[in-house]
Image: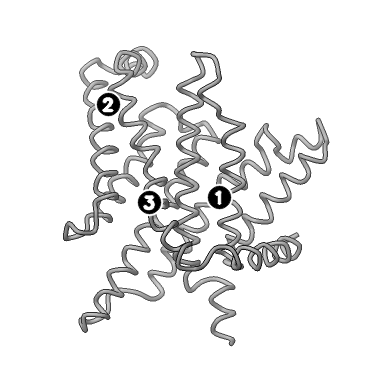
């Protein structure tokens, strides 16, 4: 399965190399990656204020929290998401960089959020949270790598890079694929289990495609193009699975949340395509053997 996917990815890689230069890819990915990664936090933070009454009702009536405690948690949640996203997107002209503090704050929020909203037992929600955490870890790794390169260029001692950085990158890369394995094996929209209840050509192709591309990302083989293909697949499926603009009013918030969260996963994949799989990967092993 991985061999077939690797062959298909090689063909796609050859086609895209001729139409999209490396410089153009890097510029597009470096701009869109961080923005998409934090877009779900921006949307969720703004939604707290735009749907304040409903948010307070959920915290008090559903989560059974004291009114003032619920209000406090909502304000902290909004401030953390919007403030941290602003730090991540802070223009490079403003020194020093605040990307890592913003990422650490968002990571903390991702860990706390399932318990805050009572979603810790929702497998789909937890898989998405782990996937978002993977994207944030990759952004932290890329920021460490950027700082190390700047130190080398200025003649300063090189930053902390090596085995620890490779393990951080690996953790981010593996976490980033959680959602795809979940969708390929469990999701009601094309999950592997659906092959037993409603077998179809589309179900077979979609499940095998997700499993193959996710496996390539996990082992770090043809990582850039596997990630780009996953971005394309995820972007197309997002339009069909979560069209919040055309559903009943009762479902708008639900669909909108998952739509923007999927965009953030795409941002994480863009960062992976931009910066590569790191030292613990087949791509890196192939470079060393040359």
Left/right of residue 200 with respect to residue 119 in the rendered view: right
> Which of the 4 quarters of the picture holds residue 54?
top left
Q: Residue furthest bottom?
A: 290
Q: Which of the two labelled residues, at mark 3 and mark 1, occupies the earlier sequence position?
A: 3
Q: Which residue is at the front of the view, 54 or 13?
A: 13
Alpha carbon of mark 3 to alpha carbon of mark 1: how far?
14 Å
From the viewer's perspective, is residue 43 above or below residue 151? above
Residue at image position (37%, 57%) is 139
Q: Position of residue 262 (x, y in %)?
A: 50, 40
Q: Secondary structure at mark 3?
A: helix
Where, by quadrant of the figure, is residue 201 drawn?
top right
Is the residue marked by circle 2 packed among few (<14), some (14-19), or many (20+) residues within 10 Å? Answer: many
Q: Nearer the viewer, residue 14 or 164?
A: 14
Q: Is residue 233 left or right of residue 165?
A: right
Whether tag 2 and tag 3 are in contact, CB under 8 A, the answer is no
- Which label number is shown at residue 231? 1
Dot 3 alpha-carbon crowd within 10 angstroms: few under 14, some 14 to 19, many 20 or more:
many
Figure quadrant of the N terminus: bottom right
Disc 2 from disc 1: Cα separation: 31 Å
Q: Identify the residue at the far front of this view.
A: 19
- Tell me which label, 2 or 1, sits earlier in the chain: 2
Identify the residue at horizontal 60%, vertical 59% (top origin): 226
Vertical order, 284 against 125 (above or below): below
Q: Secondary structure at mark 1?
A: helix
Observer-side mark, 2 or 1, equals 1
Image height of 200 relative to 6, above or below: above
Residue projecting furthest to the left: 95
Residue on which the image places disc 3: 34
Q: Position of residue 27 (x, y in %)?
A: 41, 61
Mark 2, residue position: 74
**How packed is label 1: few (under 14 Cα within 10 Å), some, or many (20 or more)?**
many
């Amino acid at each position: 399965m991985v061999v077939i996917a690797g062959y298909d990815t090689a063909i796609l890689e050859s086609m895209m190399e001729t139409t999209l230069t490396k410089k153009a890819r890097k510029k597009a990915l470096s701009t869109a990656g961080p923005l998409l990664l934090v877009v779900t936090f921006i949307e969720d933070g703004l939604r707290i204020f735009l749907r304040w009454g409903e948010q307070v009702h959920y915290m008090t009536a559903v989560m059974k929290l004291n009114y003032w405690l619920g209000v406090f948690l909502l304000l902290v949640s909004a401030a953390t998401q919007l403030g941290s996203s602003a730090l991540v997107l802070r223009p490079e002209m403003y020194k020093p960089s605040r990307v890592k503090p913003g990422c650490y704050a968002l990571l903390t929020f991702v860990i706390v959020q399932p318990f805050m909203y009572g979603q810790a037992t929702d497998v789909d929600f937890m898989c998405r949270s782990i996937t978002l955490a993977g994207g944030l870890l990759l952004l932290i790794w890329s920021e460490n790598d950027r700082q190390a390169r700047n130190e080398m260029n200025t003649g300063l001692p090189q930053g902390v890079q090596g085995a620890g950085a490779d393990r951080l990158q690996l953790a981010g890369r593996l976490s980033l694929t959680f959602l795809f394995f979940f969708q390929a094996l469990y999701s009601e929209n094309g999950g592997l289990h659906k092959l037993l209840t409603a077998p179809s050509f589309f179900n077979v192709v979609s499940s095998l495609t997700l499993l193959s591309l996710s496996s390539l990302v996990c082992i770090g083989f043809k990582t850039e193009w596997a990630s780009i293909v996953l971005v394309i697949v995820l972007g197309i499926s997002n339009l069909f699975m979560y069209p919040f603009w055309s559903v009943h009013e009762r479902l708008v918030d639900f669909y909108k949340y998952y739509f923007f969260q999927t965009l953030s996963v795409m941002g994480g994949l863009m960062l992976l395509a931009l910066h590569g799989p790191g030292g613990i990967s087949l791509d890196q092993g192939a470079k060393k053997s040359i």
